[in-house]
Image (cartoon, grey):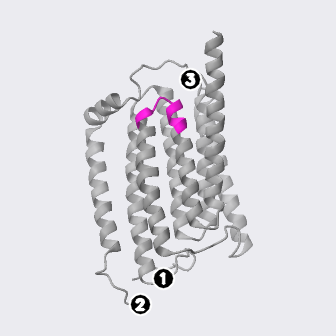
Amino acid sequence: MILASAGNVVVWMVWIVAAFSCLGSGVAVISFSNPFFSALALIGNLASLAVMYLLLNAEFVAAAQVLVYAGAVVVMFLFVIAYVGPRRETPWSGGPSWQTAGAVAAAGALLVEIVVAVGMQANGSLHSDGKVGPAFGTPAWIGRVFLVDHLLAFEITSVVLLIAAVGGVVLGSHTRRATV
Amino acid sequence: MAGPDVAWYVAVAAALFGIGALGVLIRRNTLVVLLSLELMLNAGNLALIALSRHFHNGAGQIFALAVMAVAASEVCVGLGLVVALNRRELSLDVDTLSELKG
């Protein structure tokens, strides 16, 4: 019992660190004036999200998060940021101040709307009972669910990725030279 | 799961979504807008995985993986657009990019 409560405290501490670093690096992403640092802050955000996925028994998704996002997406961002060169832009300046105030108000309203909608829908029922099978979230289980139950989604995902790759190549190719 | 309730995870996801939405609204650099979109997609992923754990249903994790693939596609096309804009020596400021006509 003492061991269980000690484990509980450890899980809480890990969760608090992950949640605060997630939100802090999220704020850092939108507040750095240099997009290079924003992309680096996104890595911290993704890593802390992966820790939370591990706490939620989603080991495979956590691994895929680190590989796909930190390994591929952020690297692509860093390449393009280095390619287009430094373009500094401070987040809170430029443009009329009513635009900034309106943006903050709109984002706040969106947050309140999410909280109210989720709270009304959940109605206090979002308590975890702590029981889940040992196979939940493992790669074998994910593979079975993905390739047996959700095979159509898997195939459509691959087609979407292929189309996006072709679109990226077409957009970035030299054949569409500037005419303006 | 010994630890925080699912409601805490959903609260973090909501806050992260709000941060991402604020980033999309206040930033003008196209690249940072794309990064903020990633934040919003990740907030959705966190909520999906937390609720998948809550309902003991694997569909949420599958959906999160599909969201990851869609996010990778979106980044691919978005960065392709950024490279195309940069090659035409257009501004990357979303306020001045007011027309799509090539």
Q: Nearer the viewer, residue A119 or B98?
A: B98
Q: State yes or no: residue A59 in magenta.
A: yes
From the viewer's perspective, is A113 left or right of B90? right
Query: Which residue type does callout 2 highlight?
Result: Val
Quadrant of the rendered structure where residue A12 is?
A: top right
From the viewer's perspective, is B48 left or right of A35? left
What residue did someone put label 3 on?
Answer: A128
Find numbered disc 2 in the image and state the secondary structure of the residue it sits on. Answer: loop
Q: Nearer the viewer, residue A121 or A74?
A: A74
Find numbered disc 3 in the image and state the secondary structure of the residue it sits on. Answer: loop
Task: Identify the subunit bearing mark 3.
Answer: A
Residue at 46 percent across and 51 percent down: it is A70
Q: Is residue B100 visible?
A: no
Residue at 65 percent across and 16 percent down: it is A5
Residue at 66 percent across and 11 percent down: it is A2
What residue did someone put label 2 on?
Answer: A180
Instruction: Judge the density around disc 1: few (<14), some (14-19), many (≥20) Cα neighbours within 10 Å.
Output: some
Is residue A116 depicted above or below B74 in this figure? above
Q: Which mark is residue B90?
A: 1
Q: Are marks 3 and 1 in contact (CB under 8 Å)?
A: no
Residue at 41 percent across and 46 percent down: it is A67
Q: Position of residue A27 (x, y in %)?
A: 65, 54
Same subunit, tags 2 and 3: yes
Is residue A6 depicted above or below A78 in this figure? above
Q: Are marks 1 and 2 in contact (CB under 8 Å)?
A: yes
Q: Position of residue B57 (x, y in %)?
A: 42, 28
Quadrant of the rendered structure where residue B82 is?
A: bottom left
Region rendered in magenta? A51-60
